[in-house]
Image (cartoon, rainbow, N blue to C red):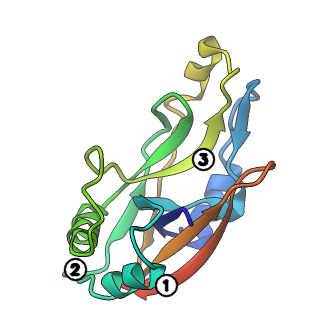
Amino acid sequence: MRLFVAIWPGQPTRDALARLALPQVTGISRTAPANLHATLRFIGEPPGPPEAVIAALRTVRVDRSPTVIVGPSTCWIGRYALCLPAGGLDPLAGELDRVLADIGIGPRPERFLGHITIARARRNAPESVLGTLVDLPFDSRFPARTFDLVNSMPSPVGPTYESVATFRI
């Protein structure tokens, strides 16, 4: 299993993301609409049974459900992920870190940066054209009432995501 924790955007945000005009660039693959999500935490292969992760995630508590603020513009996270920032999620991400640490899932390798990956660059994507995808404006908000534990299943045509469990915020 390759697990991560995510929030699925509301339908108006999904529709707006689908309408976001990306320049046609060789070596860029757009994220399938069904796979669009705000990443909260990558877990990978859990150190024990997934039921332990589910039990831990049931204990997540935050003061209030966040409003996810998507935008203001596209950016690259690393060399391969074209993203939109997803703000408003820091308290929830911190609480996720706390409960996952309690079951032996170590700290994230870098500071939390909420985002929605909208496209990926293949290794052969020309460096010179990647900049044409940066700073495309986008603005959307949606209430986050639930988050999901998701299993990522790789395939030749791109990953398939399956929700393992849904949790109310």
Q: CB atoms at circles 1 and 3 under 8 Å apart?
A: no
Q: Position of residue 123 (x, y in %)?
A: 66, 25
Q: Residue at x 74, y 51 (%)?
A: 158
- Give the amino acid type for the residue marked by disc 1 in the picture: Thr
**Labelled disc at residue 62:** 2
Q: Position of residue 109 (x, y in %)?
A: 30, 45
Q: Which quarter of the picture shows residue 57? A: bottom left
Secondary structure under the numbered disc 2 in the rendered image:
loop
Looking at marks 1 and 2 on the same chain, the residue that comes earlier in the sequence is marked by: 2
Q: Residue at x 27, y 75 (%)?
A: 103
Label tally? 3
Q: Residue at x 55, y 20 (%)?
A: 131
- Give the amino acid type for the residue marked by disc 3 in the picture: Ile
**Labelled disc at residue 166:** 1
- Give the amino acid type for the residue marked by disc 2 in the picture: Val
Gap between marks 1 and 3, in whole Å?
Answer: 22 Å
Q: CB atoms at circles 1 and 2 under 8 Å apart?
A: no
Q: Position of residue 95 (x, y in %)?
A: 22, 71
Q: Quadrant of the C terminus?
A: bottom left
Per the image, the residue denoted by label 3 is 118
Q: Quadrant of the N terminus?
A: bottom right
Looking at marks 3 and 2 on the same chain, the residue that comes earlier in the sequence is marked by: 2
